[in-house]
Amino acid sequence: MRGLCRNSRAAGAASLNSRAAFRALELIEEAFHDVEGIRVFVFEPAEDPNAVRCNNDTRDVPKMTAGRAALLCLMARYRDGLLDPFISLLEVHKLMYFMQVSGEPLRLSFTKGHYGPYAENLRHVLKALEGHRISGYDDGGDQPDKPLSLMSGALDDARRFLEGEAATRERLDRVGRLVEGFESSFGLELLSRVHWVASQQDVASLDDVVKGVYAWGKRKEQFRERQIRKAVDVLVYKGWLDGKAVCSAVQCGV
């Protein structure tokens, strides 16, 4: 067969974002135009989203555990509420934060991160699941807006595993009820920041919680005081915070 695969050029040219790159593709095609007996495919210089998945496929499918099953079920439940096939990495961290707070023994080491509570060791779980149960995590990078999705069969496997884990299923339901109305990166970051400040720091009033959130890095400007107070309302009303410890019934509106 002669020269370049024409379909490769059409697909690549559609996504190339500079004239120089397009010209380079033309030069490559011209160089191989008269070559006989060989088929050449040209791919533009970009990260192959299937690279890690292919590497993972050479390994055994990772063992299902209660924590991994909980992660997959939380992703599915949250995704269905959004009517979106993807969920961001930031949102996964926040969902797993609340899953651990609910009492699930996940052994995740959450700290105060730039985008709220963050667990460095969650990346090991995601990397193990990549290409088998989830897709999108790729090389393990931690960009907060990285979109993740469930692979075919992952949710069914997780649900089957949790059939004998009544306590974990109850905690899943509790987290699901908590995040209703906060289904966005902004909403989950707000809710988790407020919970962290109110439960992990020395606060004696609702005003202390507001000050604690505003003292947490440069991203504080995106949260209005009214939104912080509303998050406290929800956390107290749904049993995730002790209302007496952070505010009076009049302050919190409960």
Image (cartoon, rainbow, N blue to C red):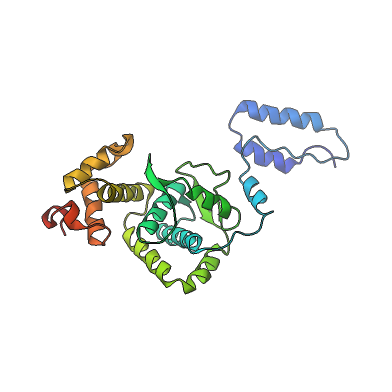
Asked whether 120 or 188 is in front, the reply is: 120
Above/below status of 77 relative to 23: below
Residue that sits furthest to the right in the current view = 37
Q: Is residue 59 above or below residue 5?
A: below
Query: Residue 140's spot in the image, x, y percent?
Result: 55, 44
Residue 117 can be seen, yes or no: no
User: Image check: 64 left or right of 42?
Assistant: left
> In the image as oriented, which residue stretches furthest toward the left?
250
Q: Residue at x 63, y 59 (%)?
A: 61
| Picture layout, residue 242 above or below residue 50 | below
User: 122 or 28, which is in the foreground?
Assistant: 122
Quarter of the image where the N terminus is located: top right
Drawn side of residue 254 relative to residue 123, left or right: left
Q: Residue at x 26, y 46 (%)?
A: 201
Q: Residue at x 22, y 61 (%)?
A: 237
Q: Is residue 148 left or right of residue 94?
A: right
Q: How many marks?
A: 0
Identify the residue at horizontal 71%, vertical 43% (top origin).
Answer: 7
Residue 75 visible from this viewpoint: yes
From the viewer's side, name the closer residue of 245 and 191.
Answer: 245
**Image x and y of residue 239, in percent:** 26, 62
Q: Quadrant of residue 183 in the image?
A: bottom left
36 over 182 or under it: above or below: above
Residue 143 is situated, as x and y percent measured from the top left of the image, at: 48, 41
**Residue 32: percent from left, percent from top:** 81, 32
For the C terminus, the image quarter is: bottom left
Q: Which residue is the extreme one toward the bottom?
A: 164
In the picture, measured across the screen, residue 234 lies left or right of residue 68, that is left
